[in-house]
Image: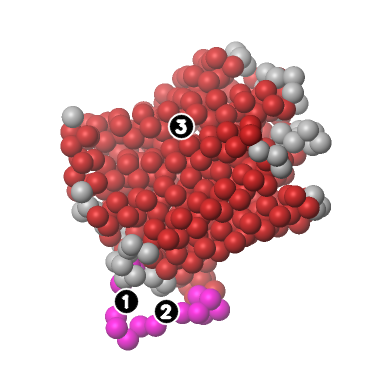
């Protein structure tokens, strides 16, 4: 198969393998950490999490550090990206240990959220840097396949990390704290693996006389740098359109995620343990969709183009989300989770490729940070909107139909905009 052959070629590249290993360990740790937070906030017996409470938790964890995104982008275009991976993962390992200590101490929620926020804030630098670095370790003609393998493998690693966290909860006392410490260990491993990459290999390129700015200097440069990055993106119409479509699909995914959480918590189970088990199955099924996307996307992009594939993904979701979701039953919703995993990841692979191929290397850190901010704002906005219409049991026909309509509008807009992405 061509996909298998292309993957073998990529995996022969030592620098690509090392960068991929950093991603896998980092995102596996993210999966472990996120499950610990979700179970502590939503599935703890002492907490009665409503849709509004879930949305509030997402806002606390996601919105504040979205503001860090532009700063991360400017600094990623000036700091050695290898060093970002090294120091960023070391810092996250330490901060995750702090979070675990706070869980054991049963501190007030605001202090717990502040600690969790500090870990996810550093995440902005690492994830944006991984995407910005990928073109430095593969050829231009290998980007589609690399984007199929690398981010999707990272998402699968996060899914496996989440599954590992569920297993740990079955056997350990003080489970949330133990799970957080497991995430800290994986962050440490990611930092150590990053040492296998050359310090200047991943860019950005600077002349010998240039000096990397301090944090204060980087903050001062942010407004000017982001304005330059946005002007650069405006000149790359295809990249801007792909980002807009992906943001819309991310909003839909966020709304359905909150729906699934509330269904697992209240509609499909009588206790927190059963609800958590259902959520674990849902995460695994969605991960299978991510894996399928990695396999089929290179073939589909080769025949439909990136625009055609993103359009098809949005159209599939528009049809199948209401067809399956309106049953509000575990079986159809699990099928919907698989489809959403496939179309969301498939569209993301195509979007990553468009942005990487059209944005100059000097701007990639900034653009991918904007990309990341849009992702988080869309997700939190969807959670907030969902909390306004979702009943406690998660069964809302208007929400399912509204999400399907937004998917359809996204596909229709891409068709109207015309030609294939170049």
Q: CA distance from mark 3 to mark 1?
A: 39 Å
Front label number (3 vs 1): 3
Q: Position of 19 compared to 102: left or right? A: left
Q: Is residue 203 above or below residue 177?
A: below
Q: CA distance from mark 3 to mark 2?
A: 39 Å
Q: Is residue 22 above or below residue 54?
A: below
Residue 14 position by quadrant: bottom left
Q: Is residue 32 above or below residue 278?
A: below
Helix, strand or loop under label 1: loop
Residue 212 is labelled as: 2
Front label number (3 vs 2): 3
Residue 296 position by quadrant: top left
Label whose residue precedes the other's in the sequence (3 or 2): 2
Q: Is residue 207 covered in magenta?
A: yes
Helix, strand or loop under label 3: helix
Residue 232 rendering spot, x and y as whole percentages:
37, 62
Residue situated in front as seen by the camera: 53 or 347: 53
- Residue occupying the point 71% across, 55% down: 101
Q: Quickly name the residue at label 3.
A: 287
Asked if marks 1 and 2 touch (Cβ < 8 Å), the reply is: yes
Q: Which residues are magenta?
A: 203-218
Query: Does any portion of residue 178 appear in the rendered image?
Result: yes
Helix, strand or loop under label 2: loop
Label whose residue precedes the other's in the sequence (1 or 2): 1
Q: CA distance from mark 1 to mark 2?
A: 9 Å
Residue situated in front as seen by the camera: 136 or 397: 136
Residue 97 rendering spot, x and y as whole percentages:
63, 57
Category of crowding for the residue at label 2, using alpha-carbon neighbours closer than 10 angstroms: few (below 14), some (14–19), many (at least 20): few
- Residue occupying the point 61% across, 44% down: 179
Q: Is residue 7 covered in magenta?
A: no
Residue 229 position by quadrant: bottom left
């Amino acid at each position: 198969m061509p996909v298998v052959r292309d993957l073998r070629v990529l995996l022969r590249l030592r620098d690509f393998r090392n960068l991929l290993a950093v991603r896998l360990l980092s995102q596996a740790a993210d999966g472990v950490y996120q499950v610990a937070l979700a179970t502590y906030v939503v599935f703890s017996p002492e907490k009665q999490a409503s849709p509004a409470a879930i949305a509030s938790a997402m806002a606390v964890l996601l919105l504040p550090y979205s503001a860090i995104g532009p700063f991360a982008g400017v600094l990623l275009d000036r700091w050695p990206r290898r060093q970002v991976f090294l120091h960023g993962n070391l810092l996250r390992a330490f901060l995750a240990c702090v979070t675990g200590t706070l869980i054991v101490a049963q501190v007030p929620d605001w202090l717990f959220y502040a600690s969790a926020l500090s870990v996810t804030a550093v995440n902005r630098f690492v994830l944006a840097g991984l995407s910005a670095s990928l073109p430095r370790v593969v050829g231009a003609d290998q980007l589609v396949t690399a984007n199929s393998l690398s981010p999707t493998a990272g998402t699968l690693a996060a899914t496996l990390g989440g599954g590992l966290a569920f297993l740990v909860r079955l056997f350990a006392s003080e489970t949330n704290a133990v799970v957080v410490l497991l995430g800290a260990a994986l962050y440490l491993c990611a930092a150590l693996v990053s040492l296998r990459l050359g310090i200047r290999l991943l860019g950005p390129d600077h002349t010998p006389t240039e000096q990397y700015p301090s944090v204060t200097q980087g903050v001062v440069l942010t407004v000017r740098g982001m304005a330059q990055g946005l002007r650069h993106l405006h000149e790359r119409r295809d990249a801007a359109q792909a980002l807009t479509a992906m943001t819309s699909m991310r909003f839909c995914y966020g709304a359905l995620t909150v729906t699934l959480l509330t269904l697992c918590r209240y509609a499909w189970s009588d206790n927190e343990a059963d609800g958590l088990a259902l959520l674990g199955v849902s995460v695994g099924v969605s991960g299978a969709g991510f894996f399928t996307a990695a396999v089929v996307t290179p073939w589909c992009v080769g025949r439909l183009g990136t625009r055609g594939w993103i359009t098809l993904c949005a159209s599939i979701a528009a049809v199948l989300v209401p067809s399956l979701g309106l049953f509000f039953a575990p079986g159809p919703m699990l099928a919907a989770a698989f489809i959403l995993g496939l179309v969301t990841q498939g569209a993301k692979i195509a979007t990553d490729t468009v942005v990487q191929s059209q944005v100059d290397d000097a701007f990639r850190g900034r653009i991918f940070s904007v990309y990341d901010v849009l992702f988080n704002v869309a997700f939190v906005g969807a959670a907030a909107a969902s909390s306004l219409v979702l009943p406690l049991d998660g069964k809302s026909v208007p929400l399912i139909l509204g999400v399907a309509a937004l998917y359809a509008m996204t596909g229709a807009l891409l068709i109207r905009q015309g030609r294939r992405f170049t």
